[in-house]
Image: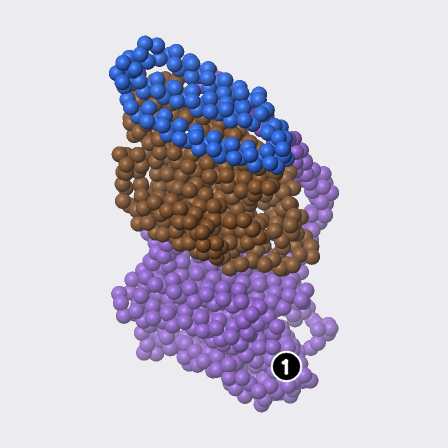
Chain colours: A blue, B brown, C purple
Amino acid sequence: MDNITTAIKLIPLEHYVFLCFALFSIGVFGILFRRNTIVMLMCIELMLNSVNLLFTAFSAYRSDAAGQVFVFFIMVVAAVEVAVGLSILVMMKRNVNSVDVNLLNKLKN
Amino acid sequence: MLTLITIAATGIIILYTTFFKSRKLLVPIAITGALTALAFNISDWNTNQLLFNNMMKIDNYSVAFNSVMILSLILILLLSHQYFKGVDKNVSEIYSLLFFSFTGACLLTSFNNFTMLFIGIETMSIPLYVLAGSKKFSIRSNEASFKYFIMGSFATAIFLLGVALVYGVTGSFNMSEVSEYISATAKISSLMKLGILFIVISIGFKIAAAPFHFWAPDVYEGSPTLVTTYMATVVKVAGIAALLRLLTGCFIGAAAEWQHILEAFIILSFVIGNFGAIQQQSVKRMLAYSSISHTGFMLLAIIAINQFSASSLLYYSLSYSLATIAAFAVLILVKNYKNSDASYESFNGLAKHNPFLAFVMLTAMLSMTGIPITAGFFAKYYVFLASVKSGYSWLVICAIIAALVGVAYYFRIIINMYYKESNSEKIIKDNYFVISLIIATAITLAVGILPQFIIGLI
Amino acid sequence: MLANSWLVLLFPLLGFLITGIGYKRLSASFCGVFASLMVFASFLYSLILFIGFKNGDSVASIVNFADWINSEKLNISFGFMIDPLSLTMMMIITGVGFLIHVFSIGYMHNDLRVNTYFSQLNLFTFSMLLLVMSSNYLLMFVGWEGVGLCSYLLIGFWYREKAFNNAARKAFIINRIGDLGFIIGLIAMFTCFHSLDFTSVFTQTLKFESGNTIITFITLMLFLGAIGKSAQIPLFTWLPDAMAGPTPVSALIHAATMVTAGVYLIARSSALFILSPVTMNLILIVGIATTLLAAFIALMQNDIKKVLAYSTISQLGYMFVALGLSAFTSSVFHLTTHAFFKALLFLAAGSVIHAYKGEQDIRKMGGIRKTLPLTYIVFFTGVLAISGIPPFSGFFSKDEILSAAYQSNIFIWLLLVIGAMLTCFYMFRLLFLVFHGSNRGDTLDIPKQKKVMTIPLVMLAILSFAGGFLNIPELFGGNFNFTNFLKSSVYGNFFKNEQLHSDQTEIILLLTVLSLSCITIYFAYHKYIIKHIIPEPDSVQRKLIPNVIYRKFYVDELYYSIIIKPYNWIADKMLPAIEKHFIDFVVNSIGVVTMAVGNRLRLIQTGNIGFYMFIMVAAIITFIAAIVWF
């Protein structure tokens, strides 16, 4: 365990932060510009996982286990969200026979 | 503690009633569960306990808000019996999902740690994504569910990013430790500022504060009306109670940072909520927009962040929840009876054959507008008082203008009910429904006349 | 006992709610009995409070039921003040109110809206009790407005008659002027004392000098409120019109209780009023002027209820004179006896009207004493009481006011004696024209007098006869029980009318007044019994002075020409210029602009998730930029 923490600390903290921001932003852009709902789900996963990485990095640098425990919570919630999200997708596919998000515009104004 | 367990256990018990295939038992079981939880909750009054390694803190603040939310839950459950009458499929899942979601809501009022806050938000939201889509073969319900899901998950991600940043700076998830860290450091680092911003924004999303309100009108309209009622009352109250708890308990040292964000929230909520509501043809959508505007009023209490904040927010939450439940309940009846899209016209002449329903709606609308002897008047009054004390007079002036605009769309229903003719007939409603309406209206009037009973609590 | 004094309020409120909500389902007889029982329960509880108070220590107690408004500066409690003054008022309201409720069961039994009637009557009782029981001015104002509302509703009870509706509206609008004064007074009081609680305000008055400008202003404004409610000059014209309501309503609201609210207000605020000689003098002047003016008008009225209405105004004038002389207890004493005998007179008049199937013109009545002997006896009792013939109640209360006036100024005494003589004359004129002589009416029908209607009459007659013994002056071996009881509630030097002048002067004064009254009564007897003079029809040309009196001094016409006409003229001129082109334009423009903005703004809600996300991300980026920037 100790050598993993040391290995993580070989890379400066800033790099982790920037990487996470970059990953997070990729996720955000994906949600903004992709029309396929499955891809949007994946982008959400990407955002959550970038946060996981950030937590791990902070946790390692502060030598505090709480951050890593939090990651488990996030993973559980991410799994639940995927389950719920995919089932919503199935329902939608059954009703409109497509997974294109642009078809969802009956509710407006 | 026992409150949470009771709520969660009731959810599980209801899930098992599926095997018995008896619809009649559902509502009594659910209400018994909720009442038991209410009793346990009230017995926690003045006990101030820290639970689970300081993860949760039960104090009078959480007990008071829990009571308001459990009251809303009970009223909604009373409405549900008639609402689900025509539904063929098994509805016990819907009840248990409601209870699971409510567990999250209870966590939101009593968290003392970011982990609990996160779990609370997610436990509350995820069942709601399902509930919003519970009309499986309605494309509108699908759309509402998906919109809510995607935007909710997005907000969750933003929230987690914020928590990660706060954790990175302070090295703790505990509220009091973070608070101590902030008061100990002279200059707040920009990572911390970003963290606070992200957290406030994501909670702003949950309570539908503009400009993060976009999901609200669509989701409120598309979801089954009963779920909308739950979202507009319990979820919003839980979110706003969590926000105040977070800001007072944790970020009070950085008030200057988030107060500007809240200012923007409030002004935009007033503008979008009111102007959005004024041109609607559908009452359901109007209520969705009006709930955005009410968020603005509730945020006024939070931005003030003084000794009046908690009590005025509690009073506002109660009056808003009761009025909203009453309004949605009447809407459910009118909508089902006319089989219509719940436009203003379907309320025409309601007073003639359904004077009771019209009176309930009248009280609800007056309370939302803020006319005296209904609770809404003192709700607005105390919120204004709190923010004037903290020097936010200009926001109060904006709020008064917003309240004036509100008259336009709230009174439109009253005019339609009392002054327009139509050939409507008496609407049938079951006893649960009537009890719920009577309780909501009676409490609205009672606290409107004697606000001290609530204001003096916390 | 005291802590539960809210029970007094609860009963009539329950009565109002139950009869009001169930007015379609409940039977008429049930509603009447139930409403009466509720008031009776309230009376019993007041009685218990009263006895407890008499036996306990005689100190005013404040009972805080709940907090009502609690913001930093404005703290208003839902509290009651139980002291001799409020206890007296509570006993009158519930006691006389109960008798009138019972009478109403018989009087209104044919009416279609009996249930509504009783619920409104109970609401009135509730509001009036709230008015006299509250421990602060704001709660009192709630009751004040409540009785105004009930008065409006009950005057216009037979709403199908347009004239009745107009009368109700007139009462409501004129009362608004007084209420405005009341509100301004309250605001001034709050800015001055930072409180509206009786105890707090009254203790603070000790710091003020007599003649203080702010106090004078406050008292003037409160007095304006009292003028409106108690129908004094110049706001008295609504009361005669208010006789449009059912007769028991006139008895309860427009004679015994509501119209005395003004007297109660001033007596309650005596601590303030004694600090302002200007206001006190004004009250005196207004009181005397009202007494005489109303008494003169009553001389020539031919409507049985209108005569009684003007006599009410005149008697209220007496009470105000007493207030103006700081004889607060005498005023409240007269209020009490007046409540008894005026309620009696109205109810007896109601019986007569009932017997004549709704006819109210005394020229079409006469000789009814043979068919309604009991009514005749009780009416006679009432007339003797109001005329101040010993030992009837009016004698004692009026005598107190007269001797207080004599203390102050013999001229005031003289004017009041003239008023008393006029009272004797018009009351006996009424008695003789209605009950003596030959029957001029053709609609006479002899209904069997019901017990529910006769028993309240007898009870009130007993009270009218014996009410004066509450406060026997020392001259007759009494010891001013009532005054001593009330003393602790009011401020001021109210003792001076007790024994300052000698017994001898007192006896001379009494005999003078008494002999003058008897002469007047004989005069009336001569005119209406011996010479059988019947008042002339409306169409007859009268001489100048009788005509002026007959036309009620043209007060209504005066108001019409100096207020209503110019008002209408201005309104007519303003309508096109200001209303249409300015106000309407501005209002409509605001509406149009709001609607247009709303229409544009709701288009943001495109329904497209991508667009929503885009705006949200843009908003987040803006927030981040703002944080980085500042």
Residue C69 visible in the snapshot: no
The residue tagged 1 is C356
Q: Residues within 10 Å of mark 1 (few under 14, many from 20)?
A: many
Q: In the rendered view, does B429 fall on the left or right side of B233?
A: right
Which of C503/C606 is in front?
C606
Which of C135/C323 is in front?
C135
Percent position (x, y) of residue B94?
48, 45
Name the image quarter holding the C terminus of chain B: top left
Q: Which amino acid type is shown beneath numbered disc 1?
A: Tyr
Q: How many marks?
A: 1
Name the image quarter holding the N terminus of chain B: top left
Residue drawn 55% across the image and 85% down it: C449
Q: In this view, does C110 lie above or below B314?
A: below
Q: In the rendered view, does B123 fall on the left or right side of B218?
A: left
Q: In which quarter of the image is residue C81?
A: bottom left
Percent position (x, y) of residue C466?
41, 79
| Residue at the front extreme, as displayed | B19
Residue C30 visible in the snapshot: yes
Percent position (x, y) of residue B367?
51, 47
Residue drawn 69% across the image and 47% down it: C570
Residue drawn 31% across the image and 41% down it: B59
